[in-house]
Image (cartoon, rainbow, N blue to C red):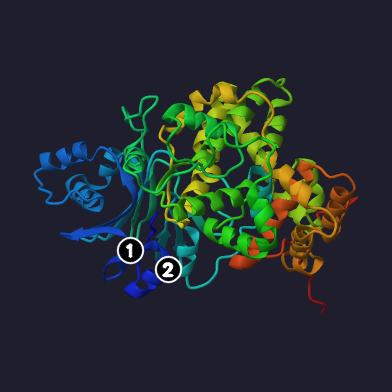
Amino acid sequence: MSRILGQFGTDIAPYVLREAAGRGSGGVRVQHGAGWALAGAAADADGGVAAVLTGRLDVRLPLLSRIEAGGRGVAERAPATLVRAAFQTEGPECTGSLRGRYAVAVADTRGAQRLVLATDDAGSIPIYHHWDRVRQVFSFASDLPALLALLPSRPALWQPGLDAYLTTGAALDGRTLFDGVRMLPPGTTAVYERGIGLSLIPRDPAVGATVPAPGTAGRELQLERARRSRGGTPADALLDLPGPGTTLLRELTGPDLPSAGPAPDEAGADALPPLDRRCVRDLPALLPELVWRLGQPEADPGALLVSALYAAARRRGIGTVLASDAAEEVVAGRRRVEAALGEGPQDWLSCYADRLAPVPAAHRARLYTRDYRAFLDDRGDAAHGLAARLGAEAARRSRRAALTAFELDEVLPVRGLRRTAHLAGGHAVSGLLPWPAHRLWTAAAPYAAGPAPTAAAGALSGLLVPGSELMDFVRETLSPSRLRISGLLSRRSVEKLFAAQLARPSERLVGTIWALVMFELWREEFGPAVRRPVPPPVRAKSPADLPALTRRAPVL
């Protein structure tokens, strides 16, 4: 997946955008003018309108028909050209007629300059943006490293970010762990105009969107199947931890499509992934690269395996695979919802939150420094905010509807689809879900029963033993000298965490250690400025009413 990026409100040289896009992005085309610039592999400009696009557009013929019906001819049917022509015909409303898996940006300089950004209904490809109020510059990119490369200084850590990450696995509500950097919500069109600011326009979900029938797949997957039938590079099943998401996709699309996972009969559930045997000694190099690709910390140990699988797909000449890692998130979300629906009216919120959290609530409270705990107590931590939000939604409609919407509209885009987009795109592979998320959610019902798979954490638990290379690396990453820099994690509590894992190994303790390691590696990789939490002022009550202070009369 190629990157798209750009700036509005300043003159920027094309080479800056090319450098920010990175050498692995293929041929980057830059469209620029006075006070604006866009870049992407798919780009087009004409008549004062420039467009860049990443991903793919489906059903281009209806879009072309709408453009021609508006009296505008289109010589080429390239996606960026269609987006540019549709915008010239209908303005920002044209984003409501786009279908597919995409992120687009359009610069309109025909009058008052404006920038339009849009993501698909599922949020398959994220768009990150930053508004510099002092410089009056708006920046955006389809991944965080590219966006950060455009900013004049490193943004600070969003102070509640660590708690949000350990509570929900990611910052929600469009936030990121970088202060001032936000992610465009799925199914949203953003319009930025100079002197006015940014407006977010939610779109209605696509009506009548095409859905492949069982046993079929999208065009890219069909092309991949045809290439294999002509004797191309064999697309052997990739190594992965087997899970219900892989089985679900195989059932929906047929057994012979390449996938970021094995065919059902190719791996035993208790097999230790070859990746762990090969690469433990290389973790000091592999994990920083992983957090660099993702741009944010990732609490799921399976992300390292998924990244290796997409890299293996690229080496084998496979350009399109079924994104079973994103399908696993759909199944996990359905499992969390069904478990919460089985709880009593007093317990369902806390039980759901605990299943969602990478680190249990009891562990989180003990891991924070005293000042960070006081900061969270004063402003409200992520768990209380989540409970208030879901409780209010469940009171307005059913518990099932509230949790399902939260999983599909909030959790899946930032935990599943974002990871697929960055890890697959980082290896020049397209990871696709051939069915829309809502249809996958329905199909996932039979796979949501039973306990959640814990093979990845179990494999790590067997490697976190005294004297192992992995244990030495983990302890160095969470050493007191490193934790002292941020002042967010209690050094003593982290030492107790290690002691508990060595005395009584458990997958939950391993998951906690992994989440902390990934946060510290992310913090060191991107170097966000950390504002140490300031404890709230103590408001002591006086035992008696104090007299009012008045200006003392001068002594004569």
437 vs 505, nearest the viewer = 505
Q: Earlier in the sequence, mark 2 or mark 1?
A: 2
Residue 270's x, y, as percent?
Answer: 70, 37
Residue lying farthest to the bottom in this orientation = 556
> Between marks 2 and 1, how big is the CA–CA gap?
10 Å
Residue at 48% x, 31% y is 250
Q: Circle 1 — which element?
A: strand
Residue 526's x, y, as percent?
Answer: 59, 66
Residue at 53% x, 26% y is 444
Q: Is residue 12 visible?
A: no
**Residue 207, quarter of picture:** top left
Is 31 on the left-hand or right-hand side of 472? left
| Kind of residue at disc 1 | Ala
**How crowded is the residue under tag 1: few (<14 C-alpha within 10 Å), some, or many (20+)?**
many
Residue 239's x, y, as percent?
Answer: 57, 45
Residue lying farthest to the front in this orientation = 231
The residue identified by callout 1 is: 39
**How crowded is the residue under tag 2: few (<14 C-alpha within 10 Å), some, or many (20+)?**
many
The residue identified by callout 2 is: 20
In which quadrant is the C terminus drawn?
bottom right
| Kind of residue at disc 2 | Ala
Residue 359's x, y, as percent?
Answer: 73, 44
Q: Are marks 2 and 1 in contact (CB under 8 Å)?
A: yes
- State whether residue 65 is above or below residue 3: above
